[in-house]
Amino acid sequence: MRIDTHRFGTLELNADQLFLFPQGLVGMETLHQWALIPDPDNESVAWLQSAVRGDRALAVISPRAFFPDYRVHIGRRDLASLHLTSGSEVYIMTTVAGHVGKLTTNLRAPLLVNLDRRLGCQVITNDDRPLRQPLPTKVHSLEEPMPISQTRAA
């Protein structure tokens, strides 16, 4: 598959390199296929690039790289679309906004990706995490997978 992007030029990707977000993302509900592209200049950042809209790419980070105590508290219903099984690997990302020197991340609406099935969803957490948490300049080492705390669906 060939994707002409504004940020990365033309990308050649196989279908198995794409992630399916069946419900889309907040504000982009009609965009379902996304590729995760590493940032060539910053190893702490990746880009979620739409497979059909070259002008749609979101900067994303692993929130635990910046906030080691970050935990996601969501209902089981929110996890259902990921088709998780015992031993499924889930990657959690948050979007980045702003400009250099004043970057923030949205800790309330993380993106969850089932790496085994290449399925993703964006959830709104059950806690009072900020929508615009300023990013510190120091990145922490990630040596363990990010735990997901499940709560009962309301």
Image: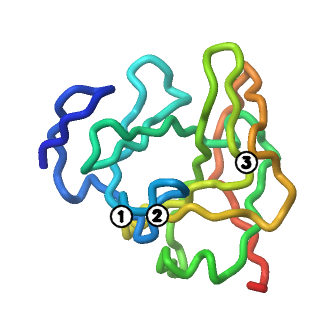
Q: Say which amino acid is labelled 1.
A: Leu
Mark 2, residues whose alpha carbon is within 10 Å: few (<14), some, or many (≥20)?
many
Q: Earlier in the sequence, mark 3 or mark 2?
A: 3
- Could you say where residue 93 lies in the image, as x and y percent from the top left? 58, 48
- Quadrant in the picture for residue 115: bottom left
The disc, 2 or 1, on the residue closer to the chain's N-terminal end is 1
Q: Looking at the picture, tell me which residue is in the foreground, 22 or 26.
A: 26
Q: Is residue 140 above or below residue 80?
A: above
Residue at figure coordinates x 74%, y 63% from the top left: 125
Q: Are marks 3 and 1 in contact (CB under 8 Å)?
A: no
Q: Nearer the viewer, residue 70 or 125?
A: 125
Disc 3 and disc 2 in contact, CB within 8 angstroms: no
Q: Where 77 sits versus 36, above or below?
A: below
Please indicate whether residue 139 sits to the left or right of residue 96 in the image.
right
Q: Which mark is residue 20?
A: 1
Residue linked to disc 3: 107
Q: Amino acid at mark 2?
A: Gly
Disc 2, disc 1: CB below 8 Å? Answer: yes
Q: Residue 92, how many percent across, how many down?
A: 59, 54
Residue at the image point whose x is 76% and y is 24% from the top: 136
* 10 Å crowding of disc 3: few (<14), some (14-19), many (20+): many
Outermost residue on the top side: it is: 101
Kind of element beneath mark 3: loop
Q: Which residue is mark 2?
A: 120
